[in-house]
Image: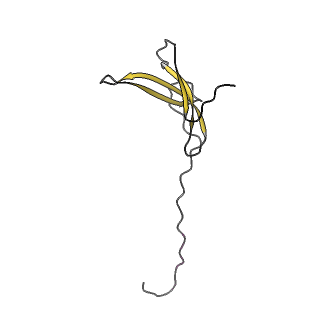
Amino acid sequence: MAFQHKPNRGSIFHNKSTDEKKPPFSGDGLIECPRCRETFQVWLSAWANQTPGGGKYLSLSIRPKDQKPESRQSSPAVSDPLPEPRQAEEPELPIADDDVPF
């Protein structure tokens, strides 16, 4: 049985490849949507960078697993977007047919 991440967790490993087109760190993870609670497998990529002041940080990329990790194309459009929230309908008030001035 393959390793399964817990929701909202992942693993990144150092790549030994010398190909400059591939990220130096990559891995995978599992993301849980807070609205629908559905989980999605994702690819993780990371690059070590440095700020102008000398601080070190990691730059991350997260893509759905249906894309190859080394692919640089944009994410596909969401095929089944969540519906817009419905607004409460105002009840219809009866129209009075009298001659009251107010």
- Asked whether residue 95 is drawn in magenta, I would say yes
Considering the image in quadrants, where does the N terminus appear? top right
Residue in the image at 53% along x and 62% along y: 88
**How many numbered marks, from 0 up?**
0
28 and 22: which is toward the camera: 28
Residue in the image at 57% along x and 25% along y: 68
**In this picture, which residue range is highlighted in magenta?**
91-97
Which image quadrant for residue 102? bottom left
82 and 13: which is toward the camera: 13
**x%, y% of residue 36?**
59, 45
Farthest left residue? 53
84 and 18: which is toward the camera: 18
Residue in the image at 48% along x and 28% along y: 61
On screen, residue 51 versus residue 12, left or right, reads: left
Q: Is residue 55 above or below residue 34?
A: above
**x%, y% of residue 91?**
54, 70
**x%, y% of residue 27?**
55, 24
